[in-house]
Amino acid sequence: MDVTLILQMIVAAALGATIYTIIGIAPGTDETAVLAPVTLVLVLTGFHPVVILSFFIASIVAKKLTDSIPVAVAGIPGGVMAAPMVEHAMILKRHGVPDLSIRKMASGSVIGTLVAVPVSLILAKALVPLADVITQYASPIFFAGAVFLALMCKNRWLALATIVPFALLIQGLRHLYWGVGSIPEGTTVFISFFLGITIGPVILTLFELLNKEKREKLNRFGIKEIKLYKTKIEKGMPNPFKILDKKEIGTSSFAALLGSMTFFMSPVGMTIFLGETLSSRIKDPIKKASRAISSMDGLTNAAYISGTLIPLIALGVPLSPMAIGPANALFNAPPVLTLENNLHHLLSTSDFVWATLIGSIIALLLTFYVTIKYSQQICEFVFKRVPHEAMLGLFFGLVLMLAFMDAGWINIAGVLLVGLVAGVLHRWGINYGVQFMVLYSAPWIVSQIVGG
Amino acid sequence: MMAELGTNTNQPKIETKEQNVEVWEDLVSIRDLVLSLIICSVTTLGGYLVAPAEPPKPLIFGLLGALLGFIVCSFIIKPKRAFNYEDREE
């Protein structure tokens, strides 16, 4: 690895950490929706895979460190993953120690990262022998994954019933594009359908705003009132091992270890379950809440890193909620990366180690320091300066561009259609996991129906 | 469009204020949202289309266009949030 490449990795990691420190704080940002489009564009632009991986790792570490800041400072989650922590952060706030939550959460994140990186590398090595079998049966495995995730949904029969129709919609559009000649036969539109699913809920809402009756019935609000809690500015360089006591370090590490080992499960579910279990026997409310949030943050961080790294290093097939969602571009971004030729095939183990180390260390140094010192100022800046409209516009614009790139003007309508259907499915409680699995297995599902 | 939205609420007192809707867990004004979607779409797709047709230039121009649109919108649109400081409960 030469010096220019390492420099590029460092710059990419610093950029990722900075961008996602800000995005992490903005409320309502879904991990997949904010990480996937940007990573996709970088992959398609042709940056070296190592540079992209260090960008991605830095981004998830920074996003994870900061999406719990608004929980502590204002009691609103900065992302889906931070939602389980609100209750505990509120307890600390009520006891007048909101800055304690930030310090404990950020330190838990650091522990999570430190545990997850080596554990993922080891686990990935152990899983390598399975890779051949899994890649051979990738399509049926994705289908089984869709069925399994559908059964885990609240409305399981509804979820199951939508699998085949949704696969037909995807394959139908692809065959239409081939038929009218907007793309050569055999070229598969993937990226833009993926993004259509991701911003489906937003697309559905936008369509509903055009519906007069719907629009008039919508709940109207004034301005969102946010209460900020004043925090003290720390002096000197914060040290996560001093901020957490020995027991908290113990439980965060344990939670991170479990989070890494259950990389194929839903991180939100594991966070709620483990965070509550690990803190349930503590009586003192402040200690209990500190223990819960530090271990929850440790776990989610670990689940993110291992959910990305393990399938990437061991399998080359996105078989974890993290891999099939936010990290998807590292597995499949045709024409640059495909399931047969992605980071798994292109990078050596030492590449993975270096990219992960550079990405996570830079993000931790930059973001951890900033998080602890200036959390209140950053929150104030984001709340005051970054309108939600601009965030929505940014991602909508990126999706439009990638749709056009994939198959021309016709595909903009195609992506809107996919988004509309995906938005309805999402509102019915059929999660992204099911829909992404169907997207992957759609060609196989259709060939099975026609063939059988 | 604003006038039409304003007539929705029965309480004249807050007539001019209660016009924001919730999209993706935060509040937006429909007018500003439409404006932002148009600005960002034009800058992003525009960047992609005017770029020299040799990859990866269109994507880089498009990405810069997206960032430009984001920055422009951040300046012309006011976030629908208000915050005040709560004193520490010592």
Image (spheres, coloured by chain):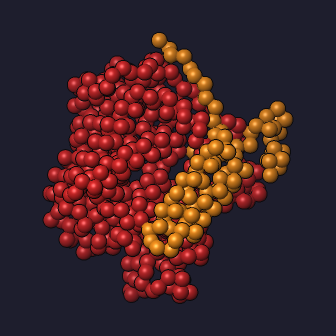
Q: Position of residue A164 (x, y in %)?
A: 47, 73
The residue under the point 40% across, 55% down is A326
Q: Quadrant of the N terminus of chain A?
A: bottom left
Please name whichever residue, A309 or A216, is drawn nearer the observer in this view of the structure: A309
Q: Which chain appears orange?
A: B
Lateral position of residue A387 relative to residue B14, left or right? left
The residue under the point 26% across, 23% down is A242
Please name whichever residue, A431 or A234, is drawn nearer the observer in this view of the structure: A234
Q: Does residue A254 lie above or below A95 as drawn? A: below
Q: Position of residue B3 (x, y in %)?
A: 83, 47
Q: Position of residue A95 (x, y in %)?
A: 45, 18
Q: Quadrant of the C terminus of chain A?
A: bottom left
Q: Does residue B42 lie above or below A338 as drawn? A: above
Q: Position of residue A171 (x, y in %)?
A: 48, 78
User: Which of the 4 image quadrants contains residue A235?
Assistant: top left
Q: Which chain appears red?
A: A
Q: Is residue A2 visible?
A: yes
Q: Is residue A60 visible?
A: no
The residue under the point 22% across, 57% down is A2
Please name whichever residue, A86 or A409, is drawn nearer the observer in this view of the structure: A409
